[in-house]
Image: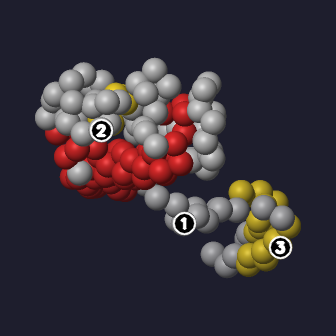
Amino acid sequence: MHCATFVLYCRSVDLRFVAEKTNIWRMVIVKKRTRINNNGFTLIELLVVMVIIGLLASLVAPKMFNKVDSAKIKTARAQVELLGTALDSYRLDNGKYPTTEQGLAALRTRPAGVKTWAGPYLPKEVPKDPWGNSYVYKSPGVHNEYDLSSLGSDNRIGGEGDAADINSWEN
């Protein structure tokens, strides 16, 4: 049983010519085996990576959110100090702090009846506190010549944590 095989390659098909005992040539067309590309990730590998990322996020996220809250408290304290400095400059020019009715807007625009106003005393508009609420200003104040407060995240008097009030007389 002597067989001779001649192989011709033509694109994706092997042309095989087989010679058998009878010397009759037959052409057999066989599809060429394509090699599977193993460069990607399996579904299980992707799921394992997603579970690991989820676990890491659940450990890190609470610590990061605590830092956001403490950053807002520090920002509110810094803004109260900044507004206090602007109020002191106003008092130096005008002899007294703005009244409660004039409010913090007197740091940006001249109030009616104030002749020695040399402002604006703030480079930008009066900021909101880090929680998006207006600062509470009273002059004359209960604790000092003026009282300036942020009511915290709950926008109510009192509170604890990020809901605690930030007051000018406590800094």
In the depicted structure, whether residue 140 falls above or below residue 43: above
Please rate how many residues cluster around mark 1, counting C-alpha atoms within 10 Å: few if below 14, some from 14 to 19, many from 20.
Answer: few
Q: CA distance from mark 3 to mark 1?
A: 30 Å
**Secondary structure under the numbered disc 1 in the rendered image:** loop
Residue 152: x %, y % from top left: 28, 33
Name the residue nearer the viewer: 26 or 70: 70
Give the amino acid type for the residue marked by disc 3 in the picture. Answer: Leu
Q: Quadrant of residue 17?
A: bottom right
In-front residue for pair 153/123: 123
Report the residue marked by disc 3.
8
Say if 57 sits above or below 97 in the image: below
Q: Residues within 10 Å of mark 2 (few under 14, many from 20)?
A: few
Q: Which numbered disc, 2 or 1, marks the residue that appears first in the sequence?
A: 1
Please tell me whether residue 43 is drawn above or below residue 32 in the rendered image: above
Cα gap from disc 2 to disc 3, whole angstroms: 101 Å
Name the spot of residue 12 as percent of width and height, x first: 78, 61
The kind of residue tagged 2 is Glu
Q: Which residue is rendered at x = 46% and y = 33% of the image?
A: 98
Of the two numbered discs 3 and 1 on the same chain, state the one appearing first in sequence.
3
- Residue bearing mark 2: 145
Residue 60, quarter of picture: bottom left
Does residue 16 appear to the left or right of 171 in the view shown?
Answer: right
Is 166 drawn above or below residue 1 in the view shown? above
- Relative image position of residue 107 (x, y in whole percent): 54, 39
Q: Which mark is residue 39?
A: 1
Residue 21 shown left or right of residue 164 in the figure: right
Q: Earlier in the sequence, mark 2 or mark 3?
A: 3
Under mark 1, the amino acid is Asn
> Residue at 43% of width from left, 27% of height from top?
99
Q: Nearer the viewer, mark 2 or mark 3?
A: 2
For the N terminus, the quadrant is bottom right
Secondary element under disc 3, as helix, strand or loop, is strand
